[in-house]
Amino acid sequence: MTRPHDCLAMRSLLAELATGAASGHERAWALGHVTGCPTCRAELEELAKVTDGLLMLAPPAEPPPEFESAVLKRLGMAGARAVGRRRFSRRKMLAVGATAAALLLGSGGSATVVYQQGESDRALAEQYRQTLSIANGRYLKAARLPAG
Amino acid sequence: MGVSDEALLAGMAAGDPQAATAFVRRYQSRVYGLAVTIVGGSATADDVAQEAFVRAWRFAGGYDARRGSVLSWLLTIARNAAIDTVRLRRDQPYDPDVLLAVLAAGDASDDREIEQIADTDQMRTALRQLPREQAAAVVLATFYGFSAREIAERERVPLGTDKTRIGSASPGCATISR
């Protein structure tokens, strides 16, 4: 499937691919190539690690004092002032718990419980479900928020 | 023991303000620091860093732990947000030598794992040891998203030479950083 001259063309593209500089067309071609070429794929992964490592070299700097609240406002969580004291509402805890149970058991029954709740809880549960399914349950710990 | 990076990210994605606050606090200096490194210390860096967190929240479902740490993932997002901004202001002078000096001198050590600090130190050493031209090409590509063609035009060297240079420089780093 992969041809030697493809690997040659790939060599000049790998660094651009790893740093995100490759154009859309080149990117599509290169990603197609690495799918079928373990050698180029390994090299790309290595280069991506180098890029990650270089970004780590940027010295940390403290943002302006209002930075945190500005970010939370943009996330629609501006009311999060009482950090540390704020608790998940009981309904949300139930929704999250039921979602986790549904995911673990693969049963539709528990999921129905979630569905009967309000719109916001459903959206929350959906987000959790996505996150959980993407990581194959790796994030189950994430549901262990302050109880009660 | 603190909450894991992955758990905070998942919590933020789920709309938990407590997790989001903890996530922002944990990473804001790294994200803002990278933004300043790329776009300079200004209100723009503030915007870029904010945008990075918004994108992280939006794309949290795309995070794949097998590909690297949450910090790496987040810094890549921040880098892309910075590049998007920089691209809009084409007149900005890019000085790879200034950037190289910042990276080589910087002390990125903080309260992260010892292993990561060791990696960072090795990477910094590798960058210092590269010939100036190669190091410039690497940082222009990594921090500003320059393509080989753009680097060639900027540094006024023939394209063929430069393609080779980026290709050869990065694996050099990779080898040393192991």
Image (cartoon, grey):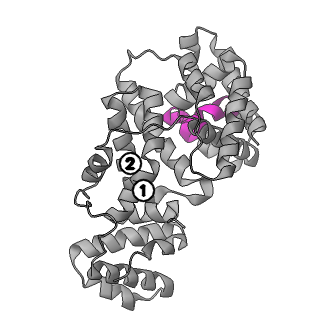
Q: Provide residue B140's location: percent of width, then percent of height.
A: 55, 24
Q: Provide residue B83's location: percent of width, then percent of height.
A: 43, 31
Looking at this rendering, what residue extends furthest in the top direction? B156
Q: Which residues are magenta?
A: A10-29
Is B89 a magenta residue? no
Which residue is nearer to you in this view: A13 or B178? B178
Q: Residue at x 34, y 67 (%)?
A: A84
In the picture of the structure, the residue carrying the numbered disc 1 is B23
Which residue is nearer to you in this view: A130 or A8? A130
Q: Residue at x 73, y 36 (%)?
A: A7
Is A19 a magenta residue? yes
Horizontally, residue A96 falls left or right of residue A35, namely: left
Q: Are marks 1 and 2 in contact (CB under 8 Å)?
A: yes
SS of the residue under disc 2: helix
Tell me the kind of residue under disc 1. Answer: Phe
The answer to whether A135 is drawn above or below residue B57 in the figure is below
How packed is label 1: few (under 14 Cα within 10 Å), some, or many (20 or more)?
many
Badge 1 or badge 2: first in the primary sequence: 1
Q: Is residue B59 visible?
A: no
**Chain of the residue displaying label 2:** B
How packed is label 2: few (under 14 Cα within 10 Å), some, or many (20 or more)?
many
Tell me the kind of residue under disc 2. Answer: Phe
Q: Provide residue B79's location: percent of width, then percent of height.
A: 47, 37
